Each structure stands twice: as structure tokens, then as C-alpha cells.
Image (spheres, rainbow, N blue to C red):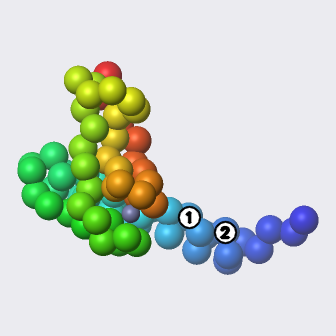
């Protein structure tokens, strides 16, 4: 398989911007703001270590699933 360098750098850029977007989103959720999932438009919920299950920010349907490391 040949890797197109231009495609590769475009991919890198995309993942980098989504990383910053995720950080911004996490910050808003942690501040107690209501942030809606881009896909299902349901509010995202913050899952902390005090709650059962994996930690992170998720919507009810699971299309947004950002895992968070609280450690
Ligand atoms: Zn969703």
C-alpha cells in the first residue's frame, strides 16, 4: 500500500484539530455547561471515577465517547 504524503499530513491536521476540539469540549462539560453531541444532539455527560463504568465524556447513544484519565 502506498501512502500519499499529502493525504497523510491532511489526516494529521484533522486529528490535531479534533484533539483541540475535544479539549475545548471537555473543559465546557467539566465547567458544568451543557454541550450537545454533534451526532445525536443529546447532552454529553461527564463520567467521573466516583461513578460506575469507564471515565470520560459520553452521550447516551455513545456516538461521542471521549475517554478521560483522571489518574
Ligand atoms: Zn451522540
Tell me if the residue at label 2 has its CB under 8 Å from ligand 1.
no
- Mark 1: which secondary structure? helix
Residue 29 visible to the viewer: yes
Q: Quadrant of residue 44?
A: bottom left
Q: Residue at x 40, y 72 (%)?
A: 39
Question: Residue 27 at what x, y percent from top left?
Answer: 19, 51
Farthest-out residue, front: 60
Labelled disc at residue 56:
none
Up-down: is 69 above or below 35? above
Which image quarter holds the N terminus?
Answer: bottom right
Up-down: is 70 above or below 40? above
- Mark 2: which secondary structure? helix
Q: Residue at x 68, y 75 (%)?
A: 7
Identify which residue, 36 or 7, lies in the foreground.
Answer: 36
- What residue sits right under mark 2 in the picture? 8
Is there CB contact under 8 Å for labels 2 and 1? yes
Q: Is residue 65 left or right of residue 51?
A: right
- Decide: few, some or many residues near mark 1? Use Cα within 10 Å; few <14, some 14-19, many ≥20: few
Q: Is residue 45 left or right of residue 22?
A: left
Q: Is residue 33 left or right of residue 59?
A: left
- What residue sits right under mark 1 in the picture? 12
Q: Residue at x 50, y 62 (%)?
A: 15
Farthest-out residue, left: 32
Q: Residue at x 18, y 52 (%)?
A: 29
- Decide: few, some or many residues near mark 2? Use Cα within 10 Å; few <14, some 14-19, many ≥20: few
Identify which residue, 36 or 21, lies in the foreground.
Answer: 36
Residue 69 visible to the viewer: no
Amino acid at each position: 500500500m502506498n501512502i500519499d504524503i499529502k493525504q497523510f499530513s491532511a489526516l494529521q491536521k484533522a486529528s490535531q484539530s479534533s484533539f483541540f476540539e475535544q479539549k475545548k469540549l471537555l473543559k465546557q462539560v467539566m465547567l458544568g455547561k451543557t454541550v450537545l453531541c454533534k451526532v445525536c444532539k443529546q447532552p454529553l455527560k461527564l463520567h467521573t471515577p466516583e461513578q460506575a463504568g469507564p471515565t470520560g465524556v459520553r452521550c447516551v447513544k455513545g456516538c461521542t465517547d471521549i475517554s478521560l484519565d483522571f489518574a
